[in-house]
Amino acid sequence: MKFELTILGCGSAVPTVQRNAAAQVLNVLERYFLIDCAEGTQQQLRRFHVPYNKINHVFISHLHGDHFFGLIGLISSLSMQGRRGELHVYGDSRLKEIIDFQLKLMNCKLNYALIFHPLTREPALIYEDKSVTVYSFPLKHRYDAPVCGFLFSEKERERTIIRDMAEAFQVPVAFMHRLKKGEDFVTPEGEVIANSRLTVAPPAPRSYAYMTDTLFREEFAEYVKGVDLLYHESTYGDAYAELAKETFHSTATQAARIAELAGAKRLLLGHFSARYPDPTPLLEEARSFFPCTDLCYDGAVFEVRQEGRKI
Amino acid sequence: MKFELTILGCGSAVPTVQRNAAAQVLNVLERYFLIDCAEGTQQQLRRFHVPYNKINHVFISHLHGDHFFGLIGLISSLSMQGRRGELHVYGDSRLKEIIDFQLKLMNCKLNYALIFHPLTREPALIYEDKSVTVYSFPLKHRYDAPVCGFLFSEKERERTIIRDMAEAFQVPVAFMHRLKKGEDFVTPEGEVIANSRLTVAPPAPRSYAYMTDTLFREEFAEYVKGVDLLYHESTYGDAYAELAKETFHSTATQAARIAELAGAKRLLLGHFSARYPDPTPLLEEARSFFPCTDLCYDGAVFEVRQEGRKI
């Protein structure tokens, strides 16, 4: 039951030898979600042994090249390799125009259906299946590049029935689904059997949020309240706080403040400016506000473990 | 006085971990010519320490993604890094539409002038300065992807005057430029002094040709007669000769035959299908026809040395 993030690139603007630009894959229960797709992402997917044929959903935060220039290559390669299943792309509606225009001028017909989902400026549920949801929410970058964050969450699962106990109290089969939802059981004699005696709580649902290329605004923390793992850009350190503001980016300290305000469990820093070949100073700045912080690097894997609950 | 080729990618279609797709840089006397620009080319330029800010001319053979998907990223990065000088791009006229469309939808204004030169289906001189020429010539790939080869040549230089000899025969200053061009000198007394006694021949002009994504046709050798260094695609080996034909590609043996027909001095094989993690079998096939053959690999550097002449 994996919930695992692989960093494919954590640089910003121009790729360096150490760091590719933005891309990552989140594996939620064997659903592979690709988040941003900078140039070279398909190479990184191979380098880090991600089964990229399993990627069915691609989320593009905004239309700056360091977040989407690799998409056309990935789309094209998947077709050459015989993909048949649908590929869903979520992004700025202009992204569809860019992809369509290139495919048309190249006379390229894909073997599979490319289904585009335009993002809006309102928080929205953009993906849902029986176990997982994905929400997009607006952040604040340059006026001509509206940007979205993404929140990936497991759904709350049903409680597990303790068979022996259910039998002992003669819970009828017809009541079982209510037991799974947490209802107490009342015996024919009127005795109330607390649900917690009859069932075990499921593991806590896990969640991951992606926030990049954004100015710092306290209210953005509201979108990711209580998230387990938060990736937040920290293009710069405190010394460049003014530059961060001018370029609509955040500092490491601001990333930490968002994590703190949101009550996140763990923070990952990324989207480092090329001026930080070693981003350790950013880590130190963030940790002084939010100790449970780590640095991304290309190829890093971060897991959110399942945790049991007593309730 | 360099004449040096650096291979940035020599794979075909889909990039693998070992091989990026098509891109290379030719340094002719400190002019850096970029030839094809697959996804990831800007990363490869950095990886192999090519001074990519010195690239002023980019030649794109045809509009398949494995030959141009890295161009938009390179164009964009050069602008972010403050480039001011013109960048000249030579390619299918649809390439200009693709680039312009993306820059427009991204609201991206470049800091420098991007000058586009559409290629034609006739052999043409597409670049010339005082020391170098570049010709394009048509090859044969899929109907919807017209492809050009490129021939890069040093111009014939003037002969070097042997000062002591010129003085001894009292050659007037006004005659020196004719001496450099190879004229004999006639003394006032009517004695003919052979030019070869008064001057030294310049090194032989060097040349490089790039031929990729093409069916084999004997007549294509005419475009590259006597070339010093020939890069010719060999997507497949003889075992896949039919597949090569169907996909409008060449085999290693066919590449060798072109080299032989052209009287090339040295052949480089590249554009290998992903089915050859080790392309050594292709080398063996080519060498049985054309011994002076080598395999490309990402990061390989091939130099054409200056050679003196006696004439």
Image: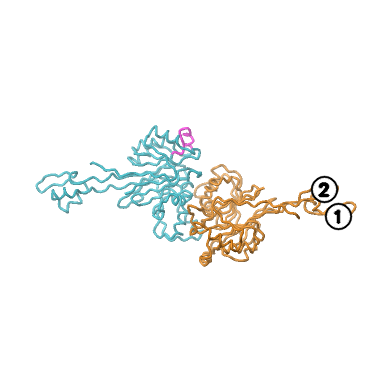
Chain colours: A cyan, B orange
Q: Residue at x 78, y 48 (%)?
A: B161
Judge from the rendering whether residue A68 lies leftward or rightward of residue B226; answer left or right: left
Residue bounds of the magenta highlight: A234-246
Query: Is circle 2 on the same chain as circle 1?
Result: yes
- Which quadrant of the structure image shows residue A207? top left
Lateral position of residue A283 relative to residue B218, left or right: left
Is A235 covered by the magenta stretch?
Answer: yes
Q: Which mark is residue B165?
A: 2
Residue B92 appears in the rendering:
no
Nearer to the camera, B158 or A247: B158
Labelled disc at residue B24? none
Task: Decide if residue A228 is on the left or right side of residue B155.
Answer: left
* Image coords of residue A103 (percent x, y): 48, 58
Pointer 2 with pointer 1, Cβ within 8 A: no
What's the amino acid at mark 2? Met
Which residue, given by chain and number where applicable, does mark 1 sit on? Answer: B192
**Mark 2 Cα within 10 Å, few/some/many (few <14, many 20+)?**
few
On the image, the x and y values in percent for residue B205 come to: 69, 54
Disc 2/disc 1 C-alpha distance (Å): 14 Å
Residue B242 image position (x, y, % from top left): 52, 67
Give me the chain letter of mark 1. B
Please tell me how crowded label 1 is: few (under 14), some (14-19), or many (20+) other residues with Cα within 10 Å. few
* Foreground tag (2 vs 1): 2
Determine the main secondary structure of the stretch shown in magenta.
Answer: helix
Q: Is residue B262 left or right of residue A255?
A: right
Local SS, label 2: helix
Q: Disc 2 is attached to a residue of which chain?
A: B
Query: Which comes before the other along the chain, label 2 or label 1?
Result: 2
The answer to whether one can see residue A46 in this image is yes
Badge 1 amino acid: Val
Viewer-side residue, A299 vs A246: A299
Residue B202 on the magenta span: no
